[in-house]
Amino acid sequence: MISRIPITDISPIVYFGGEFVAVKAIAGETIIVGATITIEGHETLSAEVCLFNTKNTMVDCQQLSESWPGTDRYEGKITVPDRGDFYFTIRATSTSQYRTVAGESERFPIRADRDRALIGSWYEFFPRSEGAVRNTDGSIVGGTFVTATKRLPGVAAMGFDVLYLPPIHPIGYSHRKGKNNSLEATDNDCGVPWAIGNADGGHDAINPDLGTMKDFEDFVKAASKQGLEIAMDLALQTSPDHPWVTSNPEWFNKRVDGTIAYAENPPKKYQDIYPINFDDDYEGIRNEVLRIIRLWVSKGVRIFRVDNPHTKPVHFWQDLLAIVHAESPDVVFLAEAFTRPAMMHSLGKAGFHQSYTYFTWRTSKQEITEYGREIADTTSAFFRPNFWVNTPDINPLHLHSGNPAMFALRAVLASTLTPSWGMYAGYELYEHRPFKEGGEEYMDSEKYEIKVRDWDGAGKKGITLAPFITQLNSIRKAHPALHRLRNLHFHTTDSEAIIAYSKREGKDLILVVVNLDPSFAQGTTVHWNMDAFGIPTQDFEVKDLLDGTSMTWNPHTFVSLNPTRPVGKVAHIVQVKL
């Protein structure tokens, strides 16, 4: 029921499953709150938004102002001071020579997570490839946690702060895949890490080829010393050899003939993987998954990348993640959900802290602008994006040429549009060969075989994007404006080949201009929306954070970016001198 003064169309709020669920935030984040507020007659209104903690103590209260005269739309800002659970309410008052009346909205929850839930630079590698050696006869000795530890300083030196590992558990033998997804594996094929489980154990065990549990614990500690958090894969599926197949056959879907159905994600088929049936023993499965999560949390893991969460019931995730949050509020879950938008959004509302996105397939100026506005404005209350430039599953079509400028410009976009971005190993070496023309699978995919990479040799030859990636991550760390999602603003350019956007947090104002054409120089005029900057309409001084150049720009700035020079330039990332 509406209050005495109707307060409607409130944002941001998240309504899901018959109740209001928490708007996503982190400590120190400022959120714009809006509402439509009306009253009968011609009386003057005043309004405010107030933030309370769980003890009902007011921690912030700010005036709302009408965003445009005569619209009855009011906006204001509140700042979430600390981690934890809060709620906000909007109050309105009308006072005349005759009376004073007041109205108040419902209470709407906000949850402030730790910073890593919003901000992070992610790097993915397969431990079995790090430190792997190719013998003279062509055979390969795979890496282990011990050898992979030697790669940690290199990852940290590039400025990454999260290292994501594909599943590290025993791999099944039944229907094991061979190279390039072959259905016939040889004795030397190592199998797909997502085909979890054999006689050595399941989701609570370490693949003996990688080492022991003690080796893993030492690896986590070594990563922490380098400033890296380990993100672990949580893949709720099994190989036909997993212990659950024998101990809990009711957890799997049966065909008419009684056999267990393998996983399919049309047009892909996963003959080496069994999906889980969550309907016949829901509590049993939930409790087992909780046991697994608690085990790895006890080993120092505080981040889980969840494989294909959209193929499991959403209410399962809402239930599971609520329990984990109550026990371990530091734990962060990233949804690997390349699926329909409604499902991706439902997973965010159910409690996932972050999600993979469609960024990988957004390439044109219009596509990037529309998607950027969606994730920064429309869905930011419940959906935190993590922009990945590639994954073991996705070798994007735009990378197939191997053009280094394309790799560079996509890294600029991913690392500056959103607070979290990710990169799979090999990107910095410009790995790009597709399995087939027009397809997005890598040739000789690391999912099916061990990769031997010469990191040092590539660096000595200069065939690496690593120095540029290091520079991008350094810029990210130094500038609070790049730590926020909701502050993204796009600006008009006269060319479809050049995109421009800005981010501001306090006195930190960052402008980004990117040439989306990796093959040719492009020039255009950028028409900066000075109101979005909050600075006077006049010339302003900037410093390019990529090359250190100082320049004078104005509201209509001509820029030229040439990616083809010996030292190509695909972007300007500048800080405005305020």
Image (cartoon, rainbow, N blue to C red):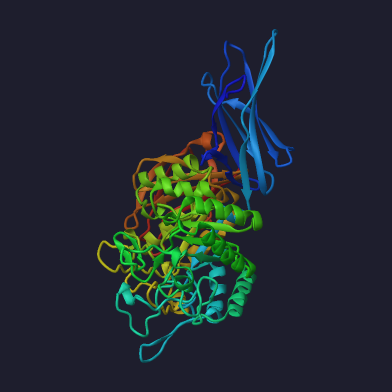
Specify whether 373 is left or right of 90: left
Q: Can the viewer see residue 325 in this picture?
A: yes
Q: Nearer the viewer, residue 69 or 254?
A: 254
Q: Give the residue displayed 52% in from the left and 38% down from the top.
A: 18
Q: Position of residue 85 (x, y in %)?
A: 66, 45
Quarter of the figure with the N terminus: top right
Q: Nearer the viewer, residue 92 or 531?
A: 92
Q: Position of residue 568 (x, y in %)?
A: 40, 60
Q: Give the residue displayed 59% in from the left and 39% down from the top.
A: 31
Q: Position of residue 333 (x, y in %)?
A: 54, 57
Specify whether 497 is left or right of 506: left
Q: Extreme bottom residue here?
A: 137
Q: Image height check: is 200 above or below 247?
A: below
Q: Give the residue displayed 67% in from the left and 48% down from the top.
A: 84
Image quadrant in which you'd find residue 230: bottom right
Q: Extreme top residue here?
A: 98
